Image (tube, rainbow, N blue to C red):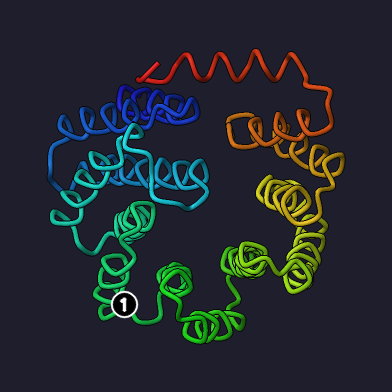
Amino acid sequence: DFIQAHVQRALTLASLRDYRGATAALTNVMKGIPNNPSWKPFRDLVTRSLQQVVTMMNADTGGKPGDPKFGLKELTLLLEEQHRDDPTNLDTVIGLAEAYMSAGRFDDAGKLLDSALLASPAEERLLAVKAQVLRQLGDRPGAESIIAALRASENPIIQRVISVTDAQFAYTDGMEARAKGDSAAARPFFERAKEVLDAYVVQYPEDYVGYKFRGFVLQDGFERLVDASRDYKRAIQLNPNDFDCYRRLAECAIGMSHFDPTIAKLMDLVESQSPDS
């Protein structure tokens, strides 16, 4: 109960964007757990929580290199220590790979995953993250080859990952085309992303991720702020701790010229909890 309480506190701090505080909390509790087999379930719990913090951080930064204030360096060092202690722990490997990606260290993420895949070449979770790394490195054929192979998986979690990854790839292609000034070329990618996510929210109506990413597409790809706001509100209902959705909802409200004071108060509260405020 003591360990679980500290883990919950760390995840609460992460939901408030205090990733450095979350990392410190997890580091402290990990130091108090004996490194022997009987305590392994508790160490695994903390490691899974570290991975979750990295995932939240990545969502908060939009997949771009992390802001130093988020404590990415400390988080990465802790995950590297955990990986040295137990290199076979897949939660650690995936968490560390995502931490590297958040820092823009895609080559390091790829090497880490390649090493893990030598021992577990058919591990689908590793392959799914590897596809994301390859896409970031510009190896689109390699990424698509992995995703194509994973489509035969009977693991429902992997199927969810594939659907979201398909949408993310299409969204990224659209944003890249738009950044080059080619809005006409961008539109089919955004339409593809929306098509995938429309099907996803029908199949998985209780998963906030589908509504969140569809909101991204509606907001950034089509400037449909009313529809995007609706999706962000649904995502918040399903996961009240996702600050990114609040921020995106506020952006939509500003764009529609009727900023919601409730959202403003919430954003002020979250920002006040930041270690740099």
Q: Mark 1 Cα within 10 Å, few/some/many (few <14, many 20+)? A: some
Q: Quadrant of the C terminus?
A: top left
Image point (45%, 69%), residue name? 136
Location of residue 125 in the rendering, given as x and y in whole percent from the top left corner:
45, 67
State how many labels appear: 1
* The one of 75 and 275 positioned closer to us in this rendering: 275
Give the vertical position of 116 relative to 2 (above or below): below
Image point (71%, 69%), residue name? 182
Location of residue 236 in the rendering, given as x and y in whole percent from the top left corner:
70, 33
Image point (60%, 20%), residue name? 267
* The one of 171 and 212 positioned closer to us in this rendering: 171
Residue on which disc 1 sits: 117
Image point (45%, 29%), residue name? 17
On screen, residue 82 versus residue 250, left or right, reads left
On screen, residue 242 versus residue 53, left or right, reads right
| Furthest-front residue in this view | 181
* The one of 202 and 244 positioned closer to us in this rendering: 244
Location of residue 26 in the rendering, given as x and y in whole percent from the top left corner:
28, 32
**Dot 1 lies on which element?**
helix
Q: Quadrant of residue 14?
A: top left
Give the vertical position of 240 relative to 84 (above or below): above
Location of residue 144 in the rendering, given as x and y in whole percent from the top left corner:
55, 82
Q: Amino acid at mark 1?
A: Leu
On screen, residue 194 versus residue 121, left or right, reads right
Q: Quadrant of residue 177?
A: bottom right
Q: Quadrant of the N terminus?
A: top left
Q: Quadrant of residue 265?
A: top right
